[in-house]
Amino acid sequence: MVTCSEKDKNSVDAKREPVLLIEVLSASTQREDTGKKLDAYYTITSLQAYIIIDPMEVWVRLHERVNGKWEMRPLYTELNSKLHIESLGLAITMADLYRFVL
């Protein structure tokens, strides 16, 4: 979770205004991470991007807020591709993201 809010600066346990959430899937939580949690995260007004990562294979799904509306970006499955989070001005290659995983 990434936050830029002054309100979250001194909070250790909870963040109220995240701009980026990253979820690593597990077999036991995959359904909830891509369903109920996704719906709940869409209601967080400060949130600009939600990334779901599969640790077992190159599989990354980016949900990004664009002009106030949520868009699901194409699936990233190639190690040589680059994940662009335009709303935050960030980019990372899949090779860097999975460097210590695969």
Image (cartoon, rainbow, N blue to C red):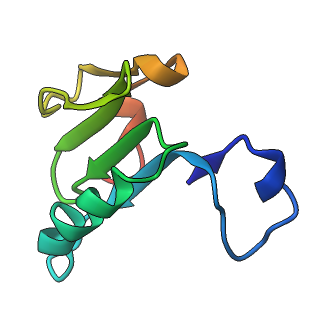
Q: Position of residue 82 (x, y in %)?
A: 31, 19
Q: Nearer the viewer, residue 92 or 21?
A: 21
- Front residue of 15/67: it is 67
Image point (21%, 55%), residue name: 54
Residue 89 in the figure: left or right of residue 70: right
> Where 58 sits versus 53, above or below?
above
In the drawing, does residue 71 fall left or right of residue 2?
A: left
Query: In the displayed structure, does residue 47 sit left or right of residue 52?
Result: right
Q: Position of residue 16 (x, y in %)?
A: 64, 60
In this view, the residue farthest toward the bottom is 28
User: Given the current orientation, which residue lies at the most extreme right position?
Assistant: 10
Question: Going 71% across and 77% down the picture, which residue do you hit?
Answer: 13
Q: Residue at x 14, y 76 (%)?
A: 27
Quarter of the image that includes the N terminus: bottom right
Q: How many marks?
A: 0
Question: Along the line of sight, which residue is nearer the eye, 21 or 75?
Answer: 21
On screen, 91 above or below 97? Answer: above
Q: Position of residue 101 (x, y in %)?
A: 34, 54
Please say if 14 is above or below 86: below
Q: Position of residue 71 (x, y in %)?
A: 22, 30
Quadrant hosting residue 86: top left
Give me the residue at 26% from left, 58% from top: 38
Q: Quadrant of residue 55?
A: bottom left
In the rendered view, does 19 fall on the left or right side of 98?
right
